[in-house]
Image: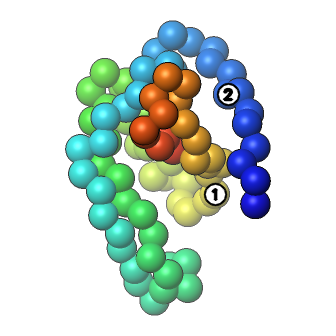
């Protein structure tokens, strides 16, 4: 599949600042996602309290989907970004 270039709209200046990844891993259980490996990211949200709040609120809602897209930040050709 050929990569599709798409601009992601940034509504606030804070959204342009990447959230640092503290650690990463993968988990797998029989009862979740058919036992397939799921990525886990530990994020440093100290500069982005709205992300921590979103995660806190989401915890009360139970499992659901999130829109995600892998991409690249302009000017950082040797990196990969996960947009949620």
Instruction: Choose the circle earlier in sequence order: 2 or 1.
Output: 2
Residue visible at 61% across and 59% down? 64
Q: Position of residue 35 (x, y in %)?
A: 48, 86
Residue visible at 37% across and 24% down? 48
Q: Is residue 74 left or right of residue 45?
A: right
Tell which residue pokes out farthest to the left in this image. Answer: 22
Q: Is residue 10 left or right of residue 15?
A: right
Q: Is residue 42 above or below residue 31?
A: above
Coloration of the structure image: rainbow
Q: Secondary structure at mark 2?
A: loop
- The residue that label 2 is drawn on is 8
Residue visible at 27% across and 27% down? 46
Rendered-image quadrant of the C terminus: top right
Q: Is residue 16 left or right of residue 8?
A: left
Q: Viewer-nearest of labels 2 and 1?
A: 2
Tell which residue pokes out farthest to the top in this image. Answer: 13
Q: Position of residue 37 (x, y in %)?
A: 44, 76
- Decide if residue 54 is in sight here: no
Number of numbered discs: 2
- The residue that label 1 is drawn on is 65
């Amino acid at each position: 599949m050929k990569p599709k270039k798409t601009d992601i709209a940034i509504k606030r200046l804070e959204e342009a600042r990447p959230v640092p990844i503290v650690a990463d891993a993968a988990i797998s259980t029989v009862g979740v996602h058919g036992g397939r490996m799921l990525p886990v990211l530990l994020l440093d949200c100290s500069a982005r309290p709205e992300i921590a709040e979103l995660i806190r609120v989401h915890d009360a809602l139970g499992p659901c989907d999130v829109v995600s897209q892998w991409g690249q930040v302009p000017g950082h050709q040797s990196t990969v970004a996960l947009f949620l």
